[in-house]
Structures are given as C-alpha cells and as structure tokens.
Image (cartoon, rainbow, N blue to C red):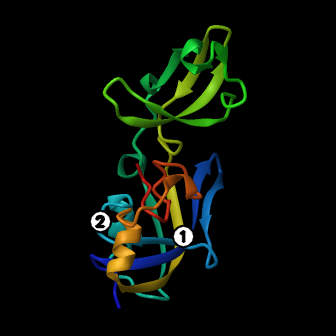
Amino acid sequence: MKITEDKVVSVTYDLTVEDGDQKELMERATREHPLTFLFGMGMMLETFEKNLEGLQVGDHFSFVLQPEEAYGEFVEANVVELPKSIFEIDGKFDSERISEGQTLPMMDAQGHRLMGSVLEIKPEVVVMDFNHPLAGETLHFDGEVIDVHDATPEEIAALTNEGGCDCEQCDSAPGDESCGCGCNG
C-alpha cells in the first residue's frame, strides 16, 4: 500500500541540521516510538509529506528541506523583551517556571497561542524568542516507512484530536507537530 491521502503512516527517521561541517541530531523517531500521522490532513509540514507521498512499507527516504520549505528564516523581530511583571504570581516573579532555556506557552494580543523560549532574564525584562526552534535551519531527514494502512474512524478521531486527547498528556509540547495525538495547537 502506498502513502496517499487519508492513510495512517508510521515512519522512523533521524532529523539532523547543519552545524558547520558536522550534522547535529535534533530528533529521532525509532521503531519503538515512530512518528505516526494521518497523511494529507495538514498535521505535518507540507514539504515533508510531499517527500513521502507514494512510498510503501520498507522504503527508505532521505531528503533535505530548506528553511523556506520548513519553518522559515530566523526573524530577529521575533526576539522580544517582555516586562518581568507579566511573569509574576501573587506579586512575585515565578522563578521556578521562568528560567533560561524554558519553552513557555504564551498568548499574543489577538489571543493566538505561541510558544516562546526564554533566552535571558534581566533585572526588569525577560528576553523571549518566538521563532520556531528550527527556524533558519536546513533539515535533513533520513528514515524508513514502517507502516501504511487505511485509517479507521477511531484512528481519525484520535489523530485529529476529535477523540478528546488531553494535550497535557502528550510527550510533545503544543505546537510541536510530532505530537501523536493531534495536539499541534
């Protein structure tokens, strides 16, 4: 069976990015913990799916996505300083949750959910990066298709979050497209 729209697809892969002359491993999906998704439903990057379309179980793949095909270029304007006061609980800065390197769910003035990474904590502000963690990166995928089958109604419900999946139970953060239960915010 070939990968086409409305098929449940499971793949293993290594995702690497260029780091000078080396490649740095960013993510790995294994046979024990594959990436499983409903093909053609917009759960994955469109260019990722295009590279898998037509493949079958046992087929290996290797492709590269340029930043403009993936998460875009790094935008300096997406690095902002926010007043420390917005991170206060009962008048005190929440230093337990807010620390350098943390990724936090935030909301913009229009009510859109965003994920932001804490870059630095200064005396009066918190420097946040709202770029996708892989923005500006060239993504290298090497993997194998390990399952392709017609989606059952139960799988469609589970993979599109119609089954009532609690996003807090995901291994991935909301907004991370690898979350297997459709909690991709």
Circle 2 SS class: loop
Picture quadrant of residue 111: top left
Q: Amino acid at mark 2?
A: Met
For residue 174, which numbered disc appears in the image?
none
For residue 139, above or below residue 87: below
Considering depth in this image, is 29 or 176 the residue closer to the camera? 176
Determine which residue is flagged by label 2. Answer: 41
In this rendered view, identify the residue nearer to me: 7 or 25: 7
Residue 72 point in image, percent of width and height: 39, 42
Residue 169 percent coordinates (x, y): 57, 57
Q: For the point 35% across and 70% down, which residue is it?
A: 157
Q: Depth check: give the residue in front, 7 or 12.
A: 7
Quarter holding the N terminus is bottom left
Name, please, the residue furthest toward the top.
124
Q: Residues within 10 Å of mark 1 (few under 14, many from 20)?
A: some
Q: Residue furthest right?
A: 96
Of badges 1 and 2, the one in the foreground is 2
Of the residues under marks 1 and 2, which one precedes in the sequence? 2
The residue shown at (65%, 54%) is 24
The residue tagged with tag 1: helix, strand or loop? Answer: strand
Q: Residues within 10 Å of mark 2 (few under 14, many from 20)?
A: some
Q: Is residue 32 left or right of residue 173?
A: right
| Residue 150 screen position, x and y as percent | 33, 86
Residue 2 against residue 66 in the figure, above or below: below
Q: Position of residue 148 (x, y in %)?
A: 41, 85
State the CA–CA distance, disc 1 to disc 2.
22 Å
Q: Amino acid at mark 1?
A: Asp
Q: Read off the residue under disc 1.
A: 142
